[in-house]
Amino acid sequence: MFGIHDLPLFVISGLLLNIMPGPDSLLIMTRSATQGWRAGVAASLGIGAGTLVHIFAAALGLSAVLSTSATAFTVVKLVGAAYILYMAVGLLRARKADGAVAAPVLPALPYRKIFAQGFLTNVLNPKVALFFLAFVPQFISFDAPNKALAFIVLGAIFNFNAMLWCCALALTTAKASERLKLNPTVSLWLNRATGGLFVWLGVKLALSKQH
């Protein structure tokens, strides 16, 4: 449907990426720990809104460039596969941190400002745009009737799963009533597991025939 393939692999990869700690997770944990779960959810919604901007911008841009060129779409997928392998190497080379990192204390803010903070944290991060341009096209068939629509559908699935994780993170952190700390050993093996998956995915994509 929509020219999408390997959807379960897309969902699993996306969930692993969302679980990995990063700036978005740190913001959610900090706000939840200092202002409660509603503040964490506000940050999550802002992050989700920022992700939507990346999804639609990438979908429209990709559609404009590739609508008449199957060769260009092939190049995009191959470059994306190379980028996925590059990310995999970085994850596999990650080392165990000396200790868990606690979220810094921040002054209380109205929920609308926390939403804006989450939105700007995400939408101004060029790595998010690069990720969507490299990752999502790998799961769109070359002969998809509407590549932009397929991109948006995949992006919406990714963002929905991300919101589930972010809201769960906000609730868990607030319930614990303390800054959530990720065990460095767990973080290390999460990086390695994701890196191994990305190596397999990158090689699979590079060697696969056109769908």
Image (cartoon, grey):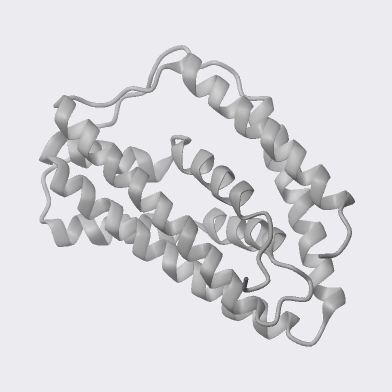
Q: Residue at x 73, y 50 (%)?
A: 83
Residue 94 as seen in the image, left or right of residue 168: right
Q: State how many labels appear.
A: 0
Which quadrant would residue 122 be assigned to in this image? Answer: bottom left
Q: Position of residue 28 (x, y in %)?
A: 28, 43
Residue 210 shows in the view: yes
- Residue drawn at (29%, 52%) of the image: 44
Res. 90 in view: no
Quadrant placement of the C terminus: bottom right
Image coordinates for residue 205, horizontal then vertical, percent: 80, 51
Residue 163, how many percent across, how many down?
35, 52
Question: In the rendered view, does 84 fall on the left or right side of 185?
Answer: right
Left or right: 23 in relation to 13: left
Q: Is residue 195 above or below residue 132?
A: above
Q: Quadrant of the N terminus?
A: bottom right
Q: Say if 210 sits above or below 97 in the image.
A: below
Q: Position of residue 187 (x, y in %)?
A: 49, 23
Quadrant for residue 76, please give it: bottom right
Point 58% across, 44% down: residue: 13
The residue under the point 19% across, 39% down is 32
Q: Is residue 154 above or below residue 202?
A: below
- Left of 74 or right of it: where is 144? left
